[in-house]
Image (cartoon, helix red, strand yellow):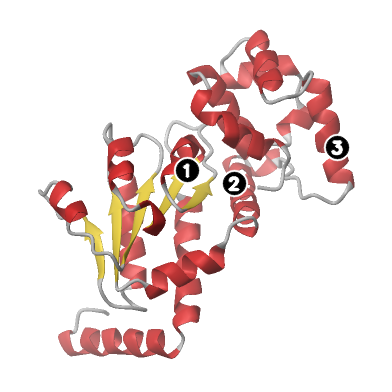
């Protein structure tokens, strides 16, 4: 995360009230709004009071909105990337800002270690519920092109307990938990092997970061009634290709083997 408030928000996120989390989510995806909008306008955008915005800014360690704005301006003058709004393209401007924020997050993450862990595990277990399930399923379908023993959990109609209990010591776990997670998500993450688990989440899941060895955050624009999953899918594509490149010849041979069977079965047009 390159903009200076992102790490402060991450450090305090688990302590925030519902209103403050709306502010945090909004500013993580739209840091430029701090420069463009007044305190009152930010409050209106997040459906909170002006006083709530002021208290939130102080909680992050800034004296007031002006001090926060000054710090962001200083960072921009140093060359720090700051996403700028483009109202002409409407909703797509939010997608662009979120993808730019994802790139900043990836630049600050240990992608090499994550790639090695996923590529090197004897088996890979990918867990996803609700809206995270199609993301998990797509990740599994991408990884199975490059390596073997990639499982999607839980199986349809099954509970997760026996699956978690059967995770081997040389397996690596990926748990995907985008907002509106199942009620038992915290217990699930706590039951996973901390030193062999990657959490892929949005800004509302930062609170689970201490429970896993790796966390990748997908900035999600929560302003619209229905969420876009452009950012999580972009992350899955990036990780899958990074792992494919890392495995090299092994991945090429695996992909060719899959393509050969596709041809034999006539499954793909």
Quadrant placement of the C terminus: bottom left
The residue singled out by tag 1 in the image is 209
Looking at the image, is mark 1 or mark 2 earlier in the sequence? 2
Looking at the image, is mark 3 or mark 2 earlier in the sequence? 3
Q: Position of residue 65 (x, y in %)?
A: 78, 21
Q: Residues within 10 Å of mark 3 (few under 14, many from 20)?
A: some
Q: Secondary structure at mark 1?
A: helix
Q: Position of residue 10 (x, y in %)?
A: 58, 36
Q: Secondary structure at mark 2?
A: helix
Q: Circles 3 and 2: CB distance less than 8 Å? A: no
Corner quadrant of residue 74: top right
Indicate left or right for 232 with 138 as reference.
right
User: Considering only vertical position in the picture, is 39 above or below 167?
Assistant: above
- State the residue at coordinates (57%, 47%): 95
Where residue 73 is drawn, which disc sits there?
Answer: 3
Where residue 98 is drawn, which disc sits there?
Answer: 2
Residue 184 in view in this figure = yes
How far is disc 3 from disc 2 in space, using C-alphas?
A: 20 Å
Q: Circles 1 and 2: CB distance less than 8 Å? A: no
User: Considering only vertical position in the picture, is 93 above or below 11?
Assistant: below
Q: Circles 1 and 3: CB distance less than 8 Å? A: no
How far is disc 1 from disc 2 in space, using C-alphas?
A: 20 Å
How far is disc 1 from disc 3 in space, using C-alphas?
A: 29 Å
Looking at the image, the residue that sits furthest to the left is 157
Q: Secondary structure at mark 3?
A: helix
Q: Position of residue 26 (x, y in %)?
A: 59, 31
User: Considering only vertical position in the picture, is 164 above or below 116?
Assistant: above
């Amino acid at each position: 995360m390159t903009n200076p408030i992102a790490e402060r928000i991450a450090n305090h996120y688990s302590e925030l009230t519902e209103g403050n989390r709306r502010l945090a989510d909004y500013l993580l995806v739209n840091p430029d709004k701090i420069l463009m909008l007044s305190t009152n306008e930010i409050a209106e955008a997040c459906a909170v009071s002006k006083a709530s915005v002021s208290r939130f800014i102080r909680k992050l360690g800034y004296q007031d909105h002006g001090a926060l704005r000054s710090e962001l301006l200083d960072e921009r003058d140093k060359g720090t990337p700051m996403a700028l709004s483009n109202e002409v393209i409407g909703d797509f401007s939010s997608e662009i800002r979120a993808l730019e924020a994802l790139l900043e997050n990836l630049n600050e993450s240990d992608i090499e270690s994550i790639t090695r862990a996923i590529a090197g595990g004897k088996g890979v277990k990918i867990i996803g519920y609700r809206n995270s399930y199609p993301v998990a399923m797509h990740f599994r379908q991408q990884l199975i092109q490059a390596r073997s023993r990639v499982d999607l959990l839980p199986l349809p109609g099954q509970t997760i307990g026996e699956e978690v209990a059967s995770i081997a010591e040389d397996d690596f776990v990926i748990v995907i938990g985008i907002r509106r997670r199942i009620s038992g998500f915290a217990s699930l993450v706590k039951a996973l092997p901390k030193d062999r688990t990657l959490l892929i989440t949005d800004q509302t899941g930062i609170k689970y970061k201490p429970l896993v060895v790796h966390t990748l955050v997908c900035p999600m624009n929560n302003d619209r009634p229905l969420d876009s999953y452009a950012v999580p899918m972009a992350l899955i594509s990036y990780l899958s290709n990074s792992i494919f490149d890392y495995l090299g010849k092994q991945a090429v041979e695996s992909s060719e083997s899959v393509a050969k069977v596709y041809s034999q079965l006539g499954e793909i047009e």
